Amino acid sequence: MLFQGQTTPDPVTDDLDAADQTPPGGHPVLVGVSANFRQQRLSFRPGKRSVGRQADNDIVLQDGSVSAQHAWLVNERGECRVVNLLSTNGTWVNDAKVHEAVLKEGDHVRFGRAEFVFHQRDDGSDVLPRQRGFRGLPWRWVGVAVAILVLAVIARILLETA
């Protein structure tokens, strides 16, 4: 189903004044972990907020991997969702490409290469990027490990033939 930004129904909020009130402990939040967005906070206030590279979005992410109109952040009665808007590089939750996903504490959300971690309440603390196995390792250390392994194999072959 395709929507134009202005024609999509907005989620219903219980009370318009509730959008202006901050709940105890703060609003749910996405906290940036990728280099260009480290510690940037994207609040989930009640309702729907647009995310994208274009200046007319509610949340502007200046990165070439983020589409002009990339996604929506939706907070409807305390349930937080991310909805992809047919972006070029996709919206990802915990390394799975999604069209729409309900977020849980600690979920990693990516808009292109812009990565964030979801928290139910913004306590103001810093978030460290997660380690991603080999993707998180500097390649020179992988090269050093391979070189040591090759030298060990050669040494064993030489010892067996002597």
Image: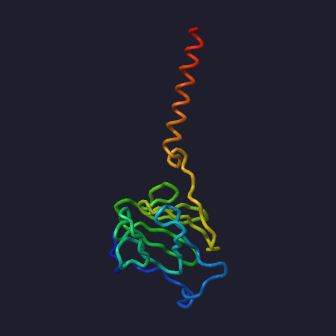
- Looking at the picture, tell me which residue is in the foreground, 2 or 65: 65
> Relative to residue 71, is residue 14 drawn left or right?
right
* Whether residue 61 is situated above or below residue 159 in the rendered picture: below
- Looking at the picture, tell me which residue is in the foreground, 47 or 34: 34
Residue 91, located in which quarter of the rendered image?
Answer: bottom left
On-image quarter of the C terminus: top right
x, y percent for residue 122: 61, 74
* Whether residue 76 is situated above or below residue 131 in the rendered picture: below
- Looking at the picture, tell me which residue is in the foreground, 66 or 75: 66
* Residue that protrudes farthest toward the right in the picture: 24
* Whether residue 35 is situated above or below residue 145 in the rendered picture: below
* Residue that protrudes farthest toward the top in the picture: 162
> Relative to residue 85, is residue 35 drawn left or right?
right
x, y percent for residue 97: 44, 57
Q: Which residue is drawn at 50% across and 47% down?
A: 135
Q: Which residue is drawn at 55% across and 86% down?
A: 14
* Residue that protrudes farthest toward the bottom in the picture: 17
